[in-house]
Image: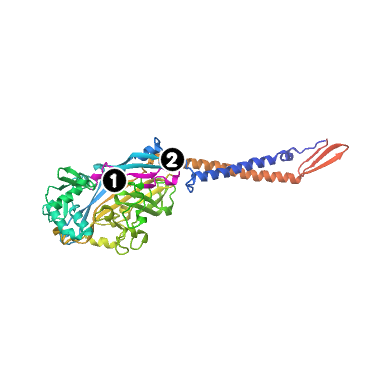
Amino acid sequence: MQQTNEHNSYFSEVNFKKFVAIFGALFLFGILLGCVSSLYFNTANPNVPHWFAIEEIGLPGSKVRELYVKSPDPIEFRIYLFHVTNKVEVINGSKPMLQEIGPYVFEEWMEKFNITDNDADDTLTFKMKKTFIFRPDLSKELTGNENITMVHPLIMGMALTINVKRKPMLKFVNNVINAMYHNTTDPFWTGRVMDYLFDGIEIDCTSEYFGARAVCSIFESGDIKSIIPLRENFFKFSVLGGMNGTGTDMYEVKRGVKNSRDVGRIVSFDNKTEMDVWGGDECNRYKGTDSTIFPRDIQKEDGLWSYEPEICMSIGAHYDKESNYQGVPTIRFALDFGDARKNKDLQCYCGDPPNDCPRRGTRNLFDCIDAPLILSLPHFYNADPSILCQFQSGLNPNQNDHAFYMDYERASGSVPNAAKRYQINMDVVPIDEVESMKHLPEVIMPLFWIEEITTSAPLKNYTHTNTQNFQQYNLILQIIQWLAIIPGTVGTIFSTYMYFKIRRATTVIHIKNGGENATITSNSNAAVYKIS
């Protein structure tokens, strides 16, 4: 005999135990997918391979290596010069009046050459060259033929250098200046902008005076990159001409194959594992990369570091704020040279700390360049305000035009937006032994400032594509993850509930009846009686 309530008996015949296992497995799959997504897409773990970021410089022949070796796009290089409008008054002790001229805009192309891989150490050695191409169409009708008046880089440079290092020789330097520059009474130079930047200011070494010959022999040695031969007994000086299209000393950097967190990190430069320029290990240590690549997932507190061989310094930009570039979240790092008189970590840049330290917001480059040059941000932005009091006019520091910043994208390790800005100044003081410099004011005289504008990372074609892939694949995995977790959770809870409900409501009685088995199943919602 069988009596059945069809509607109510349906659930009693379903194997909810099986569905608990199915939905539970779906839930666990979603959780596992979330863990995998976290490992590969959350950049907190630098030792886990990252699918869609620049995690290594790459091996020979790879696309990444090709882009790393030769930038697919130029950096926009801008230079501004300071014209002294009251030269005669300054010679007699007045405060300078300055006029900024620029920007002169160039394409800056970077290329690495003499490349060697070292698989055992996971390093790459190379030299790097920069090539500048003038863009008058971007230079606001400036041609480079404009005349400008500035401190004479050689007359003042020689005298001020000797004044720092060997004061007893100042009279001798005065005779050298008179011999080479024909008894000049003017420590300033007036000429074409492009002569100062690239084409060169002529240096006459025809004098037979032994002091002039000694100085010119230094030029002949080729040790000063800014001075190159012009013709017999003549040389020329320029700020950028000597480095245009020529190579640096040898870099050795980590490739990042074995550890992606090391990608681009400088191991040595010029075969030295640290500098010997400054007065302490911290300042002499190479930190960061060559600035053409950065590892992914640099933290706010780490700062963004790169080594700049032209100034013998590892420059560290500190966390400024959260930023955004073309819809992509970035971290903005900014540069401040700080105050070595108050910050002990910076006192290795001092002569005799804390008194003999550069002023706040400046760095003294004498030990690097062997010339009385001072590094600062443009217009002495964020520097000691008393510096501005040395001038009558021409300086107007402001954040928008003069701050140094880099917007860093953590997922790819790229810097899609940056303005790297530096100003070079000469530390001018009166020198009694040099006739033309007797009455000069004490002033940190601005010469020029530069900015390198990046509106897409040097490896932008690679990083942009992979950043998009990163975001797309991450989104897809998140969707799949939640499509597994939500149904898995609901299904598991419902199936478990139904399984235990039916189990509680079911009583199974085994009756031995005449050698036959009888099973009577009683359910509160349905009655099924079956005797066999």
In what element is the residue under mark 2? helix
Image quadrant where residue 387 sits? bottom left
Mark 2 and mark 1: Cα distance apart in space: 27 Å
Looking at this rendering, what residue extends furthest in the right direction?
A: 514
**Residue drawn at the location 48% of the way across and 46% of the way down:** 47
Marking on residue 334 = none
Image quadrant where residue 105 sits? top left
Task: Left or right? Give the position of 364 relative to 320.
Answer: left
Which residue in the protein does label 2 denote?
466
In which quadrant is the C terminus drawn?
top right
Looking at this rendering, what residue extends furthest in the bottom direction?
A: 355
Q: How is the image coloured?
A: rainbow
> Does 144 appear in magenta?
no
Query: Closer to the N terminus: mark 2 or mark 1?
Result: 1
In which quadrant is the N terminus drawn?
top right
Segment tinted magenta in the rendering? 239-267
The residue nearer to you, when weighing 217 against 519, is 217
Q: Position of residue 271 (x, y in %)?
A: 34, 46
Residue 529, relative to residue 85: is it above or below?
above
Task: Left or right? Give the position of 201 relative to 465.
Answer: left
> Does 258 appear in magenta?
yes
Can I make out residue 147 in this image? no
Query: Identity of the amino acid at label 2?
Result: Asn
Query: Identity of the amino acid at label 1?
Result: Phe
Callout count: 2
Q: Position of residue 296 (x, y in %)?
A: 43, 46
The residue nearer to you, when weighing 190 against 141, is 190
**Residue drawn at the location 14% of the way across and 45% of the way down:** 233
Marking on residue 77 = 1
In what element is the residue under mark 1? strand
Badge 1, how many Cα within 10 Å: few under 14, some, many 20+?
Answer: many
Badge 2, how many Cα within 10 Å: few under 14, some, many 20+?
Answer: some
